[in-house]
Image: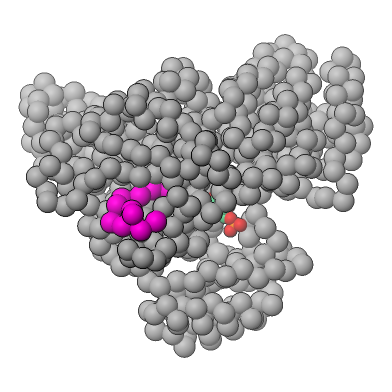
């Protein structure tokens, strides 16, 4: 009874915005920050229920990633640090759209009953609440706390400003009983960065490729800020990092800067220019869960050569395969071999040349629809699952089984052949599993892994970029009234509704050598997206345009 009146009282302070239907999309709720108070409050309630249900620590992150600064959003991190379990999404939608306190209470009652959640205050649970640097973040964070506080037994812990992947990492570490502060996060990624490099002197010194420092575009957001603060503490084996667009120079979040901008526009982010010709540059997005690299193309223009998520994926895959094959060469007396099943996961946006390259490397390539939750889930099926979206979101997942085999093998090897190539390979793989964020794609930890691998290989960014050559591609979007009218199948490569469109796309595509084209409804905007690829840029442009006309 106390619980009911508490919920009624507090929710009456948060009426939903009028005339808006919110939905928990691929990355939680996102909208103009001005209408989000009630949504964030309600997600606070949801997070509390999730914590009670799982009897674990849950995360609540307030961010709108690469969206403009006036937007904001909210999403939940599950106990393992991953995205909210998909079967809770319909409840999240219903809760966000409940029109009256009574209706909200009724939804909570029914859902708690069907999920077997006791609302008697007998259990005590914690919800970690974080936000990015958006000005609207602090008042939304208060709304989240009120939502959490309206469920008896749930306690909100304000984690302040964090990157999205940091919050996911901390939730995961807390539930594993590991040390889990922000300092622990930086301590773990910097010590594992050094461990990945352990056992080989940097080949950079021997190779005659230009090394130079790494220049990072922080998108005027939280990632740049954190990197600026912690880069001195990281003590990264000779890696020199210069951070631009930290937000302290007065630039606006995601405006002409950041990974999304660099990837979509293929021009230099603000603060970069001809003076950076030839340098190795990286770009983070507004909440630092996406990472792309680039170089400035010519001494005059503002064009960049993009080194995208597909190429990061390819670099990781090549490195890991190399370590596995070194390890395979060890004396078979040293314990049983382990049939390590390695797989890579991409979406339809992956450049066709990357997929060809990965297959040539003998790798199994799987496809899922767009959205981290799908890629992550698929990657978890492998002993080593590497996933990346072309836009730069991705990570590497290691199975528990494989990791314990690796630990055991490393122990055996270090007692009989310490310092051998095989032992070093085992050590490096273990270090990669601690460096790379197992909870979710993480620009900061991903960047350190890229840097460690480049140093190990003795590769410049140009050498890396030469792994394969991207096929020319074009992306367009078409504004539509109802994007749900388009329904796709086969990892978004085929349109099943409205009828006839797929046949028309096929007919268009057949006119182009190496042509490939698909359309899909966006998960974050009221648009249909069109992607086309062909052997020449003008062909990709024409193919995209004619298919966009089919949709219009
Ligand atoms: C969200 C997704 C991202 C996806 C993008 C596609 C997460 C954490 N983020 O940002 O993975 O690439 O949406 O946007 O899942 P779209 O549906 O508008 O094309
Ligand atoms: Zn992001």
State the residue in front, 217 or 52.
217
Drawn side of residue 210 relative to residue 148, left or right: left
Query: Is residue 207 part of the magenta span, yes or no?
Result: no
Q: Is residue 6 above or below residue 545?
A: above
Residue at horizontal 18 percent and vertical 23 percent from the top: 411
Identify the image quadrant of residue 492.
Answer: bottom right
Drawn side of residue 405 relative to residue 109, left or right: left
State the residue in front, 321 or 61.
61
What x and y, as percent, mark residue 183? 43, 20
Q: Is residue 295 above or below residue 436?
A: below
Q: Is residue 124 above or below residue 227?
A: above
State the extent of the magenta-drawn residues as a range.
273-283
Residue at horizontal 33 percent and vertical 65 percent from the top: 298
Drawn side of residue 209 relative to residue 231, left or right: left
Query: Is residue 277 part of the magenta span, yes or no?
Result: yes
State the residue in front, 53 or 24.
24
What x and y, as percent, mark residue 354? 35, 63
Colouring rule applied to residues:
one colour
Q: Quadrant of the N terminus?
A: top right
Whether residue 41 is visible to the viewer of this picture, yes or no, is yes
Residue at horizontal 36 percent and vertical 65 percent from the top: 300
Whether residue 354 is visible to the viewer of this picture, yes or no, is no
What x and y, as percent, mark residue 378? 46, 48
Residue at horizontal 67 percent and vertical 42 percent from the top: 72
What x and y, as percent, mark residue 85? 61, 39
Identify the image quadrant of residue 417.
Answer: top left
Q: Quadrant of the C terminus?
A: bottom right
Identify the image quadrant of residue 50.
Answer: top right
Disc tally is 0
């Amino acid at each position: 009874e106390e619980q009911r009146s508490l919920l009624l009282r507090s929710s009456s302070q948060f009426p939903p915005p009028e005339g808006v239907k919110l939905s928990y999309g691929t990355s939680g709720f996102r909208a103009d920050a001005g209408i989000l108070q009630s949504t964030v409050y309600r997600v606070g309630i949801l997070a509390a229920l999730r914590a009670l249900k799982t009897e674990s620590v849950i995360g609540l992150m307030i961010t709108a990633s690469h969206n403009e600064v006036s937007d904001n959003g909210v999403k939940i991190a599950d106990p393992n640090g991953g995205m909210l379990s998909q079967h809770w999404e319909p409840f999240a939608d219903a809760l966000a759209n409940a029109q009256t306190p009574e209706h909200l209470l009724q939804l909570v009652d029914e859902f708690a009953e069907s999920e077997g959640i006791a609302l008697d205050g007998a259990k005590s649970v914690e919800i970690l609440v974080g936000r990015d640097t958006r000005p609207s973040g602090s008042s939304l964070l208060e709304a989240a706390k009120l939502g959490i506080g309206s469920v008896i037994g749930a306690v909100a812990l304000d984690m302040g400003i964090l990157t999205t992947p940091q919050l996911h990492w901390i939730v995961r570490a807390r539930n594993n009983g590991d040390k889990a502060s922000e300092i622990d996060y930086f301590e773990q990624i910097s010590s594992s960065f050094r461990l990945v490099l352990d056992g080989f002197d940097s080949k950079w010194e021997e190779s005659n490729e230009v090394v130079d420092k790494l220049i990072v575009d922080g998108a005027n957001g939280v990632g740049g800020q954190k990197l600026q603060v912690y880069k001195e503490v990281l003590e990264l084996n000779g890696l020199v990092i210069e951070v631009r667009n930290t937000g302290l120079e007065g630039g606006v979040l995601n405006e002409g800067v950041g990974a999304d901008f660099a990837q979509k526009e293929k021009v230099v982010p603000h603060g970069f220019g001809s003076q950076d010709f030839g340098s190795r540059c990286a770009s983070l997005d507004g909440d630092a869960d996406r990472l792309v690299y680039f170089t400035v193309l010519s001494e005059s223009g503002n064009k960049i050569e993009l080194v995208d998520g597909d190429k990061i994926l390819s670099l990781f895959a090549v490195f890991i395969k190399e370590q596995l094959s070194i390890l395979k060469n060890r004396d078979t007396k040293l314990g049983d071999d382990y049939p390590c099943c390695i797989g890579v996961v991409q979406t339809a946006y992956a450049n066709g040349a990357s997929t060809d390259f990965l297959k040539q490397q003998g790798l199994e390539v799987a496809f899922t629809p767009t959205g981290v939750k799908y890629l992550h889930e698929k990657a978890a099926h492998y002993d080593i699952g590497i996933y990346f979206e072309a836009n730069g979101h991705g990570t590497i997942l290691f199975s528990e089984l494989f990791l314990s085999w690796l630990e055991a093998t490393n122990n055996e090897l270090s007692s009989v052949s310490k310092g051998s190539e095989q032992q070093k390979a085992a050590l490096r793989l273990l270090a990669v599993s601690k460096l790379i964020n197992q909870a979710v794609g993480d620009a900061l930890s991903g960047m350190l892994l890229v840097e460690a691998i480049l140093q190990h290989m003795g590769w410049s960014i140009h050498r890396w970029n030469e792994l394969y050559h991207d096929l020319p591609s074009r992306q367009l979007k078409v504004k539509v009234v109802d994007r749900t009218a388009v329904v796709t199948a086969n990892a978004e490569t085929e349109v099943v509704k409205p009828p006839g469109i797929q046949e028309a796309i096929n007919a268009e595509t057949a006119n182009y050598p190496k042509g490939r084209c698909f359309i899909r409804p966006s998960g974050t905007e009221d648009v249909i997206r069109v992607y086309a690829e062909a052997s020449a840029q003008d062909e990709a442009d024409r193919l995209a345009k004619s298919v966009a006309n089919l949709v219009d």
